[in-house]
């Protein structure tokens, strides 16, 4: 069986607007889903209501295994953010935001996992550069 990491935007779109139900069902049938510590942190940071906080807490408790970036992933993320950011003329805020996506992609690559995301603009260059599998919503 193959592994997958579901990106933050998929959870937010599903919980907030009812999007991606079919994609999530297919993902759960096709892959063993593992949770990224980065994604869980992003979700927790954005949970502004009690119900949102309860959803994130529930997901965290249910996460059978949480994959976190290693020291080497952090080191490599710095290089990726600098290189891709310089080639695209990104400002500091975009580079900070992109760092989490780089960490998710590096973690997925280390485990041989597919990333499930709606964020094509950030994950396409990561997929090309890192040769990591990505399934786009």
Image (tube, rainbow, N blue to C red):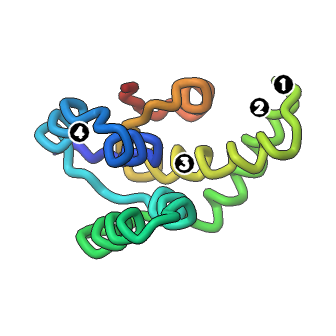
* Contact between labelled residues 3 and 4, with CB atoms less than 8 Å apart: no
In the rendered structure, the answer to whether residue 133 lies left or right of residue 28 reads: right
Quadrant in the picture for residue 136: top left
Quadrant in the picture for residue 31: top left
Residue 98 at x, y percent in the picture = 68, 43
* Contact between labelled residues 2 and 3, with CB atoms less than 8 Å apart: no
Q: Mark 2: give few (<14), some (14-19) or many (20+) Cα within 10 Å.
A: some
| Rendered image: mark on residue 87 | 1
Which SS class for mark 3? Answer: helix
Q: Mark 3: give few (<14), some (14-19) or many (20+) Cα within 10 Å.
A: many
Mark 4 vs 3, N-terminal side: 4
| Above or below 91: residue 87 | above
| Rendered image: mark on residue 24 | 4
Mark 3 vs 1, N-terminal side: 1
- The residue shown at (72%, 58%) is 75
Alpha-carbon span between mark 3 and mark 1: 20 Å
Closest to the observer: 102 or 53?
Answer: 53
Which SS class for mark 1? Answer: helix
Which SS class for mark 4? Answer: helix
Closest to the observer: 125 or 53?
Answer: 53
Alpha-carbon span between mark 3 and mark 2: 15 Å
Residue highlighted by disc 3? 106
Quarter of the picture holding the N terminus: top left
Which SS class for mark 2? Answer: helix
Residue highlighted by disc 2? 84
* Contact between labelled residues 1 and 4, with CB atoms less than 8 Å apart: no
Alpha-carbon span between mark 1 and mark 2: 5 Å
């Amino acid at each position: 069986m193959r592994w997958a990491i579901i990106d933050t935007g998929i959870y937010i779109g599903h919980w907030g607007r009812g999007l991606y139900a079919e994609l999530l069902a297919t993902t759960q049938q096709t892959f063993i889903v593992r949770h990224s510590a980065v994604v869980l942190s992003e979700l927790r940071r954005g949970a502004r209501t009690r119900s949102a906080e309860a959803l994130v807490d529930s997901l965290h408790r249910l996460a059978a295994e949480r994959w976190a970036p290693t020291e080497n992933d952090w080191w490599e993320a710095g290089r990726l953010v600098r290189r891709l950011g310089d080639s695209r003329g990104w400002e500091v805020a975009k580079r900070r935001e992109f760092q989490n996506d780089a960490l998710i992609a590096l973690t997925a690559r280390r485990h041989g996992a597919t990333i499930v995301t709606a964020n094509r603009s950030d994950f396409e260059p990561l997929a090309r550069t890192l040769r990591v599998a990505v399934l786009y919503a």
